[in-house]
Image: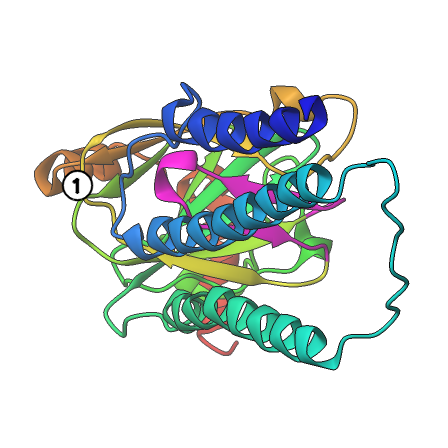
């Protein structure tokens, strides 16, 4: 009897802890509410199954407890029960997977009007690149990375000369505009994660991964690395600041382009090479 009650208390306590826990999601700052909804569906399904299984265990412990003169019946197979369990499990798994597949399709389908920006992770800091007035990011190569070219931009690419490069600083984004975030890593696995954005993706050396977001409220949000990347992993922090469009453009005008950071020699060389001489 005591064991059955204890099992029921575990089930009830787990559900109540989930519903009234002080640890919950941070207020969302993008239009990825679909992700929250998908997680909630998973919680409801797994919570129902967990409660049902534990309640059934409690019932069995109480109903079939030891009594004098009672003998156990050995029944190794029950086809009807196995069919019901298989069908129920299949329906439950499908109910959890289907919303996730729908959201994943939305997650990787970037709007055509999205602006591309780049985030580069390295032990242990973030660097950011935004397109300049031409609206395009220049090409890059890790072999070009140097102290005066931290993101490895190709100096011969004219589209990269006006790119805005922010090394170990804060990233600003305009509210209400879709943004495709290109992700690169220089050394090991990193993961650019802003809890309020919900979207995240591993950054793999030698690959360019991505996700897209549309900020829906202004504010300052912490950037975390969600992949254990070494001894100073916990110090790999930055800020993303979502601005009104006018404030964003005012901030952007104050930033230096790759050409300005590289110096006049780089500008002359890039112009000479792009002219085909």
Viewer-side residue, 263 vs 25: 25
Residue 184 in the image, given as x and y percentages of width and height: 60, 53
* Kind of element beneath mark 1: helix
Give the percent coordinates (x, y) of residue 234. Answer: 64, 21
Q: Label 1, on which residue?
A: 249
Say which residue appears at 88% left-offset and 69% top-offset: 76
Graded by Cα atoms within 10 Å as few (under 14), some (14 to 19) or many (20 or more), the crowding at tag 1 reads some
Q: Nearer the viewer, residue 37 or 135?
A: 37
Where residue 67 sits, quadrant-wise, is: top right
Q: How is the image coloured?
A: rainbow
Count of numbered circles in the view: 1
User: Residue 212 occupies which quadrant of the picture?
Assistant: bottom left
Relative side of 190 to 77, left or right = left
Question: Where residue 143 sits: x, y (%)?
Answer: 73, 55
Determine the image quadrant of residue 111.
Answer: bottom left
Name which residue lies at 69% across and 55% down.
204
Q: Quadrant of the N terminus?
A: top right
Asked whether the viewer can see residue 146, the reply is no
At which x and y percent is residue 235?
A: 62, 19
> Closest to the observer: 27 or 245?
27
Which stretch did the figure color magenta?
186-205
Whether residue 197 is in magenta: the answer is yes
């Amino acid at each position: 009897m005591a064991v059955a009650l204890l099992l029921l208390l575990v089930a009830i306590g787990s559900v109540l802890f989930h519903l009234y826990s002080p640890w919950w999601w941070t207020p969302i700052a993008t239009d990825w509410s679909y992700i929250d909804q998908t997680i909630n569906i998973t919680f409801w399904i797994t919570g129902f199954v967990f409660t049902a299984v534990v309640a059934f265990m409690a019932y069995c412990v109480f109903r079939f407890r030891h009594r004098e003169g009672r003998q156990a019946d050995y029944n190794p197979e029950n086809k009807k029960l196995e069919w019901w369990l298989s069908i129920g499990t299949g329906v439950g798994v499908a109910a959890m997977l289907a919303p996730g597949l729908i959201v994943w399709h939305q997650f990787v389908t970037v709007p055509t009007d999205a602006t591309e920006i780049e985030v580069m992770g390295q032990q242990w800091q973030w660097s950011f690149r935004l397109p300049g007035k031409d609206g395009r990011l220049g090409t890059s190569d890790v072999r070009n990375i140097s102290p005066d070219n931290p993101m490895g931009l190709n100096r011969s690419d004219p589209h990269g000369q006006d790119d805005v490069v922010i090394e170990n600083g804060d990233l600003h984004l305009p509210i209400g505009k879709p943004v495709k975030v290109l992700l690169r890593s220089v050394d090991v696995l990193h993961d650019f994660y802003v809890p309020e954005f919900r979207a995240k993706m591993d950054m793999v050396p030698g690959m360019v991964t991505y996700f897209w977001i549309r900020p829906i409220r202004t504010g300052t949000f912490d950037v975390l690395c969600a992949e254990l990347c070494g001894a100073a992993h916990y110090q790999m922090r930055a800020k993303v600041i979502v601005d009104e469009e006018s404030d964003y453009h005012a901030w952007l005008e104050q930033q230096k382009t790759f050409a300005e950071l590289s110096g006049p020699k780089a500008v002359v060389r890039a112009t000479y090479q792009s002219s085909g001489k």
